[in-house]
Amino acid sequence: MIFLSPPHMSGKELEYIEDVFKSNYIAPVGEYLDKFENKIKEYCNISNALGVINATSALHLALRVLGIGKDDIVLSSTFTFIGSVAPILYVGAKPVFIDSDKSWNLSSKLLEEALKKLPKKPKALIVTHLYGQMADIEQIVKICKEHNIYLIEDAAESLGATYNKKQSGTFGDFGVYSFNGNKILTTSGGGMLVSKNKEWIEKARFLATQAKEDALYYQHQEFGYNYRLSNVLAAIGIAQMEVLDERIAKTREIFRWYKEQLQDIQEIEFMPELPDSFGNRWLTTVTLKKSDPFKLVQKLQENGIEARPLWKPMHLQPLFENEQSFLNGVSEDLFNRGLCLPTPTNSSFNELEKVIKVIKKYVS
């Protein structure tokens, strides 16, 4: 089986896990969790970081810390994964969806249109850097500052991606990363919340540990969550950080290889990369001009190859059928024409030749 984006261990994960077991700090908090948070801070050039159980919990904490609650409006990319949006519902707020631009990410033009037309001022924007590619983040930052709106970057898929050499997740008030099993850096499950604001991260840390007050006994003035990343998983993260740049180099190499192998097929177009940006190419994603991508996904799966359609936009989900959206048709068109190709960093190009053969046979 050729998987879409399987875990790829460096070899040192077991060594670091053994250290954790020797210390007996296998529960949340411990030396390796501190080290992992520090590694992320150093790599991303951000001053504060908090390791949590996944990126969705990180987004939830960000919204709580920013005081967003019942009936507040939170803008969001519509072309994204449900985990980007569900935390808006957790805090009782109302999502408003913004469609995509040529980068496939949130359109700054539609964002400005939404801010002019909405009768109530939004409190925050959650912008997704899709499939490891940067959104038009500098323009989005500018708009949010002009309208005094909090900006949260869903960089779950884009660790290592940059815009003008600045890391994704470090432009807004908060950024979140995912270390799920299929991400470019995996701890099997986990996430990280980052911010330049130390007080906000410390508040998030407090909420992530059940909001326990500083007392000898368990005392609570507000409710929190059991959201801290475990020391064991953080040890895996340390080993993964040591090879992160190698993994990004490989995913970008796989993207270039696909593009070279499929360059003669006019039917196929690849996800673009904005000028001045550098994507981690977590997944190689394409659109088809005429052929049915869903049928191609089925053909690939029949041949032992994992593939996936592009995200179904949130405004098309039954869950959000009554929510407001600002649309231009881009994300819906991408969903109807696109798919994700396997981008396994632990596979050879000889193995991936099988993918090319199935695509060429189907498209022809």
Image: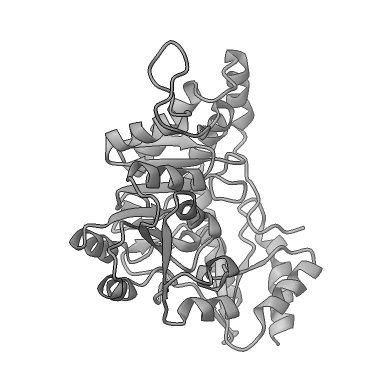
Please say if 256 is above or below 333: above
Give x and y (percent) for residue 124.
33, 56
Q: Residue at x 40, y 52 (%)?
A: 70
* Res. 128 in view: no
Please say if 23 is above or below 293: above
Question: By what rule are the colours in the image chosen?
Answer: one colour
Q: Is residue 69 left or right of residue 286?
A: left
Give x and y (percent) for residue 298.
75, 73
Among the 4 quarters of the image, the one containing residue 161: bottom left
Q: Is residue 137 left or right of residue 57?
A: left
* Res. 194 in view: yes
Residue farthest to the left, as pictured: 146
Q: Residue at x 24, y 65 (%)?
A: 143
Question: Quadrant where the N terminus lies?
Answer: bottom right
Q: Residue at x 61, y 25 (%)?
A: 17
Q: Is residue 41 left or right of residue 157?
A: left
Give x and y (percent) for residue 253.
53, 61
Question: Quadrant where the C terminus lies?
Answer: bottom right
Q: Residue at x 60, y 53 (%)?
A: 345
Give x and y (percent) for residue 8.
62, 45
User: In front here: 93 or 364?
Assistant: 93
Residue farthest to the top, as pictured: 216
User: In front here: 17 or 196?
Assistant: 196
